[in-house]
Each structure stands twice: as structure tokens, then as C-alpha cells.
Amino acid sequence: MNFQTMSKQRKYILIAAAVGIVSVFLPWMTIGMMGMSDSTNGFRSYGIVVFIAFAGAVVISLMNDQTKTLDQTMWMIALTAGAAALIFTILFFTNLNGTFGMVSAGFGLWISLVASAGVLASAWLFKNPGDTLQSGLDSLKKSMPKGTNQPTTNTNRAAELEKLIDMRNQGKISEDEYQQLKSKLL
């Protein structure tokens, strides 16, 4: 990794995601009751998902040729990681209101909000000029591994086997030819 030659997009995503990772270990909530206060970091519940999203953004920024902006597929994944970090940070924040007592958001939570917005902004502002959300989704779909559809394959094999049996019964192929074709099919 050469930070000097890294593209702006990757550099800013990396910085924002690294700040986000650090923010998870800072106080996310402060509980104060009767003159006493205690704080808890964000590495719990939704905060774990936020941590994973920031870690994913770091990995994406370090993958492949770092001198170039992210390709459409990686760009879409970076946007998704930033959005996930933002959404789950907001969910953590909204759950604070349901907690009894004097609970307030800690500075780590606020830093996480800014860092997740930073990942999103960096990915979006420094994207390739032709990249759109639709083209990113299309690229992401194309990069997904194609699953084999086992029931269709088995159905096709059964249909072929029925044809072979009919051909044998009608005398179009011999028993030996039937056995050879059957072994190839199965």
C-alpha cells in the first residue's frame, strides 16, 4: 500500500472507514444517574454490524489497483458498506431513546455517524463519471456466481432417460446402445 499514489476515492474511503472502526471502541452511550455516569462503547448489538461494515470498506479500498478509482462492482459494495454503517448507527441511536434512565449518545456514536457519511460521500463524489446506481447494480449482478439449478437439471435428465427408454422399446437403438447412452447421461 502506497498512500501517496492511492486514488482520492480509495484514500478518503480508507480514512473515513478507519475513523469509523476507531469510533466503535469509543463511548457510544453515556448513562448518568444521581450524579454518577458510566459509558459503554459501540461494540455491542448494532455496533458490531457497523464495525463489520467499516472493516469491509477498508478491505475494498485496499483491493486491486489502488491508483485507480473503484470499478463499478467494488464501488457498489463500498456504497453498501457505508449505507449499512450509517443505517445501523442510526438504529443504535434510536434505540437509546427506548432505554430508561438518563441515557445520552456518546461522542463515539457521533463520530460513527460522520465516518459512515464520509464513506458514502467519498465513494459517491470521487466515482468514475459514467458510474450510476443502475450500472453499479447491473455490474454487481453480473459478478454474482451463477448457481446451478439442480431440479431443472434432474428434470432434463429424467426426460432424456424417458426418450432413451422409448427409443429402446421401439427398436430404434439396441440394448447395448441404450446402456452406453444411459451411462453417459447419468
Image (cartoon, rainbow, N blue to C red):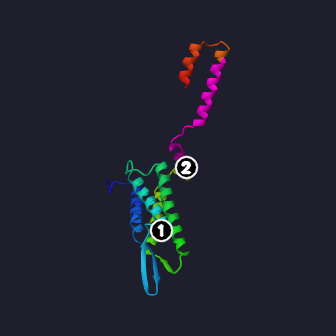
Q: Residue 22: where, in percent of width, then height?
A: 38, 66
Residue at which label 2 appears? 137
* Residue at (53, 64) in percent of width and height: 87
Q: Would you say 144 lies left or right of 108 here? A: right
Q: Residue 99: where, in percent of width, then height?
A: 53, 76
Task: Give, as a three-letter code, the residue at label 2.
Answer: Leu
Element under disc 2: helix
Given contact means CB atoms under 8 Å apart, are the residues at marks 2 and 1 in contact? no
Residue at which label 1 appears? 113
Neighbours of disc 1 within 10 Å: few (<14), some (14-19), many (20+): many
169 up-or-down from 105: above or below: above
Q: Would you say 162 lies left or right of 38 here? A: right
Figure label count:
2
* Residue at (49, 48) in percent of width and height: 73
Q: Label 2 to label 1, Cα distance in Å?
A: 25 Å
Residue at the farthest bottom position: 35
Residue 154: within the magenta? Answer: yes
Task: Give, as a three-letter code, the residue at label 1.
Answer: Leu
Range drawn in magenta: 138-166
Q: Residue 170: where, in percent of width, then height?
A: 68, 14
Residue 63: within the magenta? Answer: no
The majority secondary structure of the magenta stretch comes to helix
Quadrant occupied by the C terminus:
top right
| Tag of residue 37 | none
**Sequence order check: which comes first, mark 2 or mark 1?**
1
Q: Residue 181: where, in percent of width, then height?
A: 56, 19
Element under disc 1: helix
* Residue at (44, 66) in percent of width and height: 115
16 up-or-down from 136: above or below: below
Nearest the camera: 144 or 63?
144
Nearest the camera: 142 or 38?
38
Residue 6, image quadrant:
bottom left
